Image: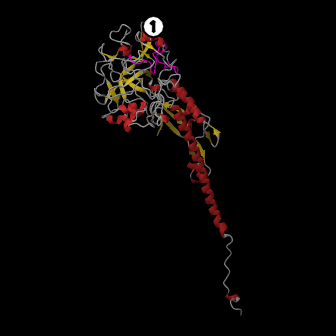
Amino acid sequence: MVSGRHPPWQRPPRPAAQDGAFAIMFVPLLVLVVAFAGLAMDMGMVYNRKVELSGIAKAAALAAAKELNGRSSGIATARTRAREAAQRFTYRYGAAVAWDDAALSFSTTPARGGTWVGADSVGDASGFFYARVDTAAIGALSASVSTLFMRVLSDGLATVEVADTAIAGRAGIHAVPLAICAMSETRAGERINTGLSNSELIEYGFRRGVSYDLMQLNPRGNTAARYMINPVIPPGMPSTSFNPGILGPFVCASNLWMPRLTGGPIRVSSLASAAPLIGLVTQLNARFDDFGRGLCFPAGAPPDTNIRAYTYESAGGAPWMSPAIGLPAAKITTERGRLETVADIPGMGSTAPGLNGGSFGPLWSYAKAVRFSSYTPGEPEPASGYTPFSTGDWPKLYRSDISSSNYPGTGQNSPYNPINTMDPPTVASPSATHRDFATPLRRVLYVPLLSCQGAPPSGANVPATVLGVGKFFMTVPATSDTLIAEFAGAASEQSIPGAVELYP
């Protein structure tokens, strides 16, 4: 017998054939693979439709909310912008979005459970600052996805709802947390100036183009009335306390954490009688590229593109003025038993005793006096502005010894923004390190004007009613007890810029 070989009766049996075992195992494995792949396809399709509709809803709501200005024109523009925003998207991998205005509604509150009405049902638009987009109302967009494999798990998963709703609206308003009394309770008045055939528009008692020390005004007495605003309590909301130490960032950015200033009392605190602006001066002066003490930063509180201070008390400080030197603001007087300026006294002109042209301060640094005839009650100021007077009218608008010398602006241009923006006497740029942050019109302050009809509010964190908002242009940096700014007109609350954001 050959060594190493087994006789047939001693050989091990052959293993049973296993050729079909893999096929038997592969079939259920394939079913699982196909099932998971199908579920992944269904879930991917649902996710993609949901993301597409969510993006459409958010973009359209934000676009609409940015246009809401409390007027019917804002509602109309919001409809257009929502449609345009939605149509920039595609649906189902490239299909165009067929917008339907039924998807857009408006409200006075961002609450999902609030009252939302369509554009045609808004009526008085003054309080409508919030827009909602519900993609379920866009008939051309399917609000549900029919699944292929998920329905195997449950009949309830045969279709999955993917419609989305987004709400957007104002979260803040770009006003400073400082307020003063309106010098008149009347929105628009008419001032007759001797020798002029056209009367002058007066707004809440202020004259456009005249500089006021906002810390030295009171329509009801000889003691200054000026206030800090609680920046985080919306109108009509109760408040038990107010820490003035929080004001700094709000002054830097000119922003209040409230969507509007009217609709209920705001909360204010009286400013100190002496050096009222201590602690806020640097924040105000960030607009003049003053970032001392690190209280404001250029990225969040940029300087103005033109930081030239019109210091009229120094020679050449307002190079277009004649006489060439005078007070930094119109002279304060108590002649009528109230704290106001000589520019506001009716009939003040060439016969006013003890005055000269310099007592009116620099004129028209930013804004010009305008004709009352160009004002239409209930209508916003045109984008081109009201019809201004000419510099040749100064002797009749103010005093006979006031005139303009080389005034650099025509039309609505002014020394702040002359035709030639490189004009060195009236324009100065911020430092090179801050120039990239510079923002136009940062020196324009939106200041709430309070109703002081009975008596000015007094105390800490007390309620006060906002009559309107004044635009004031800072002509010079603030000091511890002065905030000198030129009145540039009344601004409708709706026209004031504000932060717009999405709400949950």
Q: How did the renderer colour the structure?
A: secondary structure
Q: Position of residue 498 (x, y in %)?
A: 46, 31
Going by the picture, which residue comes out furthest to the front?
Answer: 315
Q: Could you tell whether 316 is left or right of 453 in the image?
A: right
Label 1 environment density (alpha carbons within 10 Å; few <14, some 14–19, many ≥20): few
Nearer to us in this view, 209 or 356: 356
Tell me what residue is drawn at x 54 percent, y 37 percent. Answer: 59
Q: Quadrant of residue 490?
A: top left
Q: Is residue 23 above or below residue 326?
A: below
Q: Is residue 381 above or below residue 280?
A: above
Q: Could you tell whether 414 is left or right of 215 in the image?
A: right
**What secondary structure is the stretch in magenta mostly built from?**
loop
Q: Position of residue 21 (x, y in %)?
A: 66, 70
Tell me what residue is drawn at x 46 percent, y 21 percent. Answer: 366
Going by the picture, which residue comes out furthest to the top?
Answer: 195
Q: Position of residue 99 (x, y in %)?
A: 60, 34
Please give the residue where the numbered disc 1 appears in the rendered image. 196
Nearer to us in this view, 151 or 226: 226
Q: Is residue 382 magenta?
A: yes
Q: Could you tell whether 497 is left or right of 275 in the image?
A: right
The amino acid on which the numbered mark 1 sits, given as a three-letter code, is: Leu
Asked whether residue 220 appears in the rendered view, the answer is yes
Q: Quadrant of residue 14?
A: bottom right
The image shows a total of numbered marks equal to: 1
Which quadrant would the N terminus be assigned to in this image? Answer: bottom right
Asked whether residue 233 appears in the rendered view, the answer is no
Q: Position of residue 242 (x, y in %)?
A: 31, 34
Task: Determine whether the residue tagged by mark 1 lies in a helix, strand or loop.
Answer: loop
Nearer to us in this view, 282 or 467: 282
Q: Is residue 274 magenta?
A: no
| Span colored in magenta | 359-385
